[in-house]
Amino acid sequence: MTTTETQNYKVADLSLADEGRLLIDWAESRMPVLMSLREKFEKTKPLAGHRIAGCLHVTKETAVLIRTLKAAGAEVSWSGCNPLSTNDAVAAALAQEDIRMYAWYGQDTEGFYWSIDRTLDFKPTMTLDDGADLIFRVHSHHQDLMEGIIGGSEETTTGVHRLRAMAADGKLEYPVIAVNDAETKWDFDNVYGTGQSSLDGILRATSVLLAGKNFVTAGYGHCGKGCAMRAKGMGANVIATEVKPTAALKANLEGVRVMTMDEAAKIGDVFITTTGMKDVIVKHHFESMKDGAIVSNTGHYDCEINIAELKEMAVSSREMRDNCIEYTLSDGRRIYVLAEGRLVNLAAAEGHPSEVMDMSFANQFQAMMMLAREGKDLGKGVHELPEELDQEIAKIKLDAMGLGLDVLTPEQIAYSTDYSQGT
């Protein structure tokens, strides 16, 4: 693949910039919360003097966040957090807007980490992450930069788990805000965003009819629940596999069949993994699957489906459609793997809709603002965004949608804390 490269960027094709600007403009028209924050802070520029290194999917929605960080005064350097999620047109547009941009679709492992390293060349004061690869890279390969970094933020469930493990091991050396744990992120982006965009990716890669299919979601957390909800809405017979008893109970009470993956592998037509755990679908599951089974992943890393074992079993493979590889087994059964086992919603589609990323990225912006104000006083470890910021974001979103709220009266407020009131 050819790329366009200077000291400040490396992208696939700078001539795609006009297309990228149109995509970004479209996203801006659908992201009123982030745009209102931009308007509020572009005059005072509270992020002036800060250098933000980001490692997050390069999509049109991410571009709106980057533009907002820049409008608030920050210098920004960016890489993609997944080799197959970068929109090359968006990357080109941002490279032309004085953003240090190191991202292109189809990166190999060397290019992926080279790009992260380049984002660190300007010695950031803050990091912004999706999956914690950037934070871990700083800790493992760029410890000399640690003293100048006041804090970071983390976008996704997998990354927050990784960072909490680092903190528990005493290895996390600066404060990180768990953006994923904000209600306006996990209960919207993870449910409604993942549900819609993951099914979008499956359908773009296969064009199959979901109605009547046995749709298996591995995991019934927020992402799994979103996928199940949307698949059920399209007429699929939804099955969930789980390791957590309460999650399995919720699935059952919401009309979803619950069984082990060993059982589901025999009857599933379409599979999607949503767990963040390795080896969710492995060799003995492939051995049980019916001819034509479709396998996909919407967890952060590509280790949930053990594709290496499937390749060893296969006698041949071929690319049937974009992001759809057919593996033929010795008995003639065919299994289709989407997006090489990476995030199907980003690799085979466009990621979450702009409207839901509006709140997630407003949280990222608020995290950077919080670090600029308080980062030097926060201790090492994983921190939460304040509840009032969460509710402020939700209120701005409601206002943009033309939806009003009731307000508690003084008497109701007093009653809410009056423990002497009885029956």
Image (tube, rainbow, N blue to C red):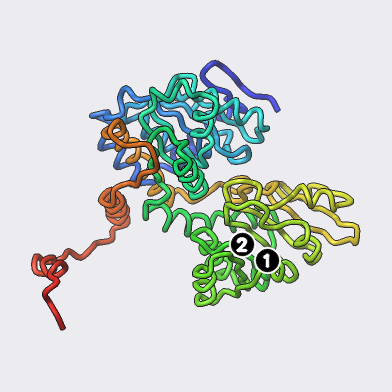
Sequence-wise, the earlier of marks 1 and 2 is 2
| Marks 1 and 2 in Cβ contact (< 8 Å) | yes
Q: Residue at x 41, y 39 (%)?
A: 153
Left or right of 249 on screen, residue 386: left
Q: Quadrant of residue 418?
A: bottom left
User: Which residue in the protein does label 2 denote?
Assistant: 218
Point out the image quarter for the C terminus: bottom left
Query: What kind of residue is marked 2?
Result: Ala
User: Which residue in the protein does label 1 denote?
Assistant: 261
**Callout 2 crowding tier (Cα within 10 Å): few <14, some 14–19, many ≥20:** many
Q: Residue at x 40, y 46 (%)?
A: 179
Residue extending farthest to the bottom is 423
Q: Where's residue 12, x and y in %?
A: 62, 28
Tell me the distance, in whole angstroms, between the alpha carbons under discs 1 and 2.
8 Å
Q: Nearer the viewer, residue 175 or 263?
A: 175
- In the figure, 243 relative to 202: above or below? below
Q: Nearer the viewer, residue 355 or 359?
A: 359
Point out the image quarter for the N terminus: top right
Q: Find numbered disc 1 in the image and state the secondary structure of the residue it sits on.
A: helix
**Callout 1 crowding tier (Cα within 10 Å): few <14, some 14–19, many ≥20:** many
Residue extending farthest to the front is 169
